[in-house]
Amino acid sequence: MHNLLKGKRGIISGALDSNSIAWKVAQRCRQEGASIVLTNAPIAMRMGEIKKLAEETNAEIIPADATSVEDLTNLFTKSTEILNGKIDFVLHSIGMSPNVRKNVPYTDLNYDFFTKTLDVSALSFHKMLQVAMKLDAMNEWGSALALSYIAAQRCYPFYSDMAEAKATLESIARSFGYHYGKKRKVRVNTISQSPTKTTAGSGIKGFETFFNFAESISPLGNAPADDCANYCVMMFSDLTRMVTMQNLYHDGGYATTGVSMEAMEKFSS
Ligand code: NAI
């Protein structure tokens, strides 16, 4: 451990169970010396798993539906009280599409569901940032991060309306990053992560097959959740002070590989 986050205070959303990327980020942030508050949708609390993480990381849990400005206002206000100061880092690790959940075809989308997808998976990041800025709840050189996926740039047919959500999410990081940088020197970025075996990931149809495909394309293989947590720690640390408004690929080289020899062999006659 390197004490990279010594004395820093953070809010981590999205830890549902021990497979969640946010779960690993919380553990790593704690190991690096940060004090954290955990948050998730009130409905996710019912599973009770998050309490184990809270004990392990010595964190309080503040339930918040990330689509509710009221809940988020409570989250940031209480977090600064509990942690005894302004926030240095925030992780947005939230995604959900009712269309995907209910297997609705992309060319026959339910638009109420679509609106929900965008609200939960993308606008919630804007809401977090807007609330934090209005409350002046973040320290200068603070860092806000959201987790994204390459379907924001390229077509992945199975990813349905989550592709639009991720494109919006990354755009929010750029646009808000400008304003928050100017106003308070707060950094805003997204990390575009490899397919990862979590509740949200495995909910996508054909996930397992695609996981194996991506593994065969990426020179380093798919990036595991533990490594994603390390990358998040680095982005929260002072070592990346001047990085903002970026979408950063954490994918073992997948994004810039056209094809691998391994994948080619599968199609040779
Ligand atoms: P996960 O299922 O463990 O986490 C998703 C979280 O979103 C859950 O904790 C859930 O309770 C929370 N959530 C849903 N609706 C919410 C709401 N209204 N308010 C607050 N929280 C809410 O799965 P995972 O994979 O750890 O997902 C985290 C992030 O990583 C998501 O943004 C996902 O799209 C992204 N990601 C995941 C990849 C994967 O293959 N698993 C690949 C690239 C990005």
Image: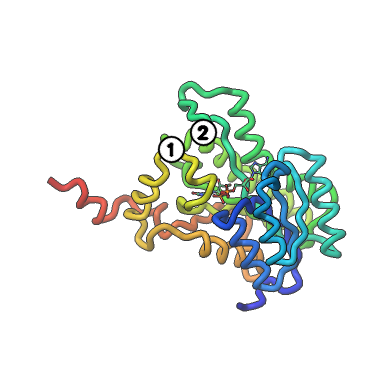
Label 2 SS: helix
Read off the residue under disc 2.
100
Read off the residue under disc 1.
205
Q: Which residue is pictured at 67% across the width and 60% down the height?
A: 52
Q: Residues within 10 Å of mark 1 (few under 14, many from 20)?
A: some
- The color scheme shown is rainbow
Q: Do the residues labelled 2 and 1 touch (CB within 8 Å)?
A: yes
Q: For this rendering, which residue is in front, 219 or 182?
A: 219
Q: Left of 74 or right of it: where is 262?
A: left
Could you say where residue 57 lies in the image, as x and y percent from the top left? 70, 66
Could you say where residue 143 lies in the image, as x and y percent from the top left? 69, 59
Q: First in sequence: mark 2 or mark 1?
A: 2
Confirm if mark 1 falls within 8 A of ligand 1: no
Amino acid type at image mark 1: Lys
Confirm if mark 2 falls within 8 A of ligand 1: no
Q: For this rendering, which residue is in front, 197 or 171?
A: 197
Q: In this view, does 164 lie above or below 140?
A: above
Distance between the alpha carbons at the discs numbered 2 and 1 = 8 Å
Could you say where residue 5 lies in the image, as x and y percent from the top left? 69, 71
